[in-house]
Amino acid sequence: MKHVITALVQNQPGVLAHISGMFAARGFNIDSLVVGRTEDSELSRMTIVVVGDDTVLEQVRKQLGKVIPVVKVRDFTNTENVQRDLLLIRVHASAEKRPAVVDLVNLFRGRVADVARSSVVIELTGTEDKIEAFIDLVRPYGIRELARTGVIAMQRGGRK
Amino acid sequence: MAKTDGKKYKMKLDKGFVGACGGEIIQQMLVDHGVEVLFGFPGGALIPLFDVLYDSSIKLVITRHEQGAIHMAEGYARATGKTGVAIATSGPGATNLVTGLANAYLDSTPIVAITGQVRSNLIGNDAFQEADMTGISRPITKHNFLVGSVDELGRILTEAFHIASTGRPGPVLIDVPVDITINKLSAPADLTMRIPGYKPNVSGHVRQIQSAARVINASKRPLLYVGGGVIHSDATAELRSVQEKGRLPTTTTLMGLGTMDESDPLALQMVGMHGSAPANYAMQECDCLVAVGARFDDRVTGNLDTFAPGATVVHIDIDPTSISKVVKADVPVVGDAKTILAQMVEFIEPTDRTAWLEQIADWKKRYPLGYDSGGKYIKPQTIIEKLGELTDHNAIIATGVGQHQMWTAQFYGFRKPKQIITSGGLGTMGFGVPSAIGAQFACPGATVIDIDGDGSFSMTMGEIVTAVHHALPVKFIVMDNEYLGMVRQWQEMFFDKRYSGTVHPCPDFVKVVEGFGAKGIRVEDPARLTDALQELLDYNDGPAVLIVAVDPEENVYPMVPAGKSLHEMELGRLA
């Protein structure tokens, strides 16, 4: 089972190393980890996708909370939330195949970010399912290169 | 304008520390935090700081090895509850602290370790005596800091002492680049802490406390399982009131020894791999297990699949990560033991549990801790029993790690908290000598004795020189069987006595310690043991070491073999 957790952490050198080191030492299975700035310059937001059951999830939450620069931990399991992942993917596309590929891009409401003689770089944002579905559909054309940011998430409704 | 009193540095800084250099700020803040003794070793990156310390009233104890320094700081902290402070230079000095940091981390000992670091602009360049100490110590410290500028030095020291000594205590490392100790502060320092993410939970939730009491009151076979957390929390009086009101049988972990008087009828002594049989049977047969300040370590539980099968588990602990980490807690109560036990006592009802108490008394009668005495060799257990009598069970006892440590836990008869100073979680051989020295610095008037094995003693015996320099009347007993005993026991029991790597020839320890400047005594004849112990206890002109040649193949019983359940102990002679 995949769970999304976010942590508000102090924006200090070494915090990312501290947290990823803790996950490694404890043997937690981390699917993705994204960290970036927030509206507060003192704080960063880290979004982590954990693979495991409820017992594992509880330990992850608590161990994160124990890390001193972590200010707040939120568990998105069983909440109404918005999740987005950003994909950049280079797909093989000669001039003849390009319209078919671009067609798929439009259907998924993505964008072509770069065009080269025999390939295109596509940019797509969406839920994990949407991203996975798109990758599946373009796979037959040939995937040259793929990069994903990992999931970030925010609760629906008013600011908590 | 601050007075220098003719000294090179200001020992009493102006408010805000304006004009002070980093070294002066460190000195001042150590004094402000009540630091009276600093254990450490100098080096290039520390020269400016040591220049300031030269004028300081803080006692500077220079050791033979930085590992000795940090174990001394640990012994100091465990004997008093105060934060121990160790200092080491950059590179190899700092890396020599690693074992002590890991040790303090696992046993939750409050330590502030200050390490020198190369110049700020050289960090990351593979400079001379550079080591990424914040990287290296991250998994084994509660928190660590790399000081970026002299402006934040005061705030960092404040945060470090706060983090080390509050909540679940632990080691905190501060890496200080040498230029920071020289730079001067131009604007007033702001010491306000900036750790919004650190809010240890002290008071328990009242409803959880009431739930816990309800479960205890309804139980027929309750058992209190008490760990080191009760000692950190100074909660022995509150524990006593809960025990007495509920008539609750109690077992302790190694780290919890001293939380109750072991001669009390409710006391079951230590539980676990080398715990007493009554404690282990009680653990397996109880219907309500109340863990207080303990973390269900694998040395205590044995096989988890069959651990305490019928028990409803109440877990009181200040660290939420310990709760339900190993054993699922039915009633978790997060908070400080002292506060929670004080609140809980009013909800505990005196309940008649005659059958359970009779069962426990029966186990204690049939399976007391014991050993076969007699024969030509001195038995290690006899040494400890006699020592207990001669010191009235009142001495501060440090140990190394191994068989001698387990016999000390079983036979000394601890009565008070902060009496046993031992390495539990990490099991660090060599802990005994320096931690005893640290405890003696902390408690100058007390009788402090390190009970050690020849293996552990050999690792850090050089620190006896440090004790000689300071004329400390600290005492050491070395149980010499010329084996690495605990591993030898496993090899005897499970590997056909193939003593691979465990034969441990020793030097003439008496000559060695006399060369150090300490008193050395050796005894082999059982008839002479009491006199030899008394001679050791009576010598107070400096450190004294008693080497006792013991039965080389004595084993620790009971023993729960790896993978077995607590009730599947090897009972040795009691079987």
Image (cartoon, coloured by chain):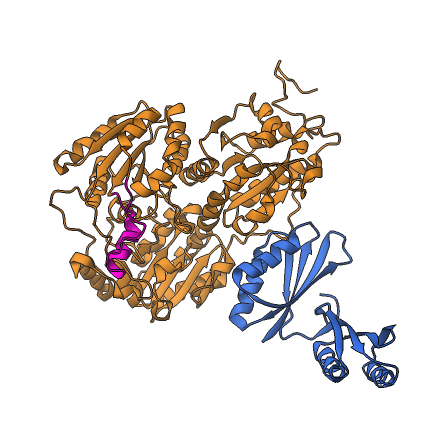
The residue positioned 51% from the left and 36% from the top of the image is B85
Figure colour of chain B: orange
Residue B487 visible to an observer of this rendering: yes
Give the chain letter for blue: A
Question: Does the stretch in magenta take in A45?
Answer: no
Residue in front for this viewpoint, B95 or B102: B95
Farthest residue toward the top? B6
Q: Which residues are magenta?
A: B482-505
Q: Where on the picture, by quarter, is residue B89?
A: top right
Image side of residue B3 versus residue B539, left or right = right
Residue in front for this viewpoint, B170 or A91: A91
Q: Where on the picture, by quarter, is residue B189?
A: top right
Q: Is residue B116 above or below residue A124?
A: above
Quarter the N terminus of chain B occupies: top right
Pinpoint residue B201: horizontal percent, then vertical percent: 54, 54
Pinpoint residue B349: horizontal percent, then vertical percent: 34, 61
Quarter the C terminus of chain B occupies: bottom left
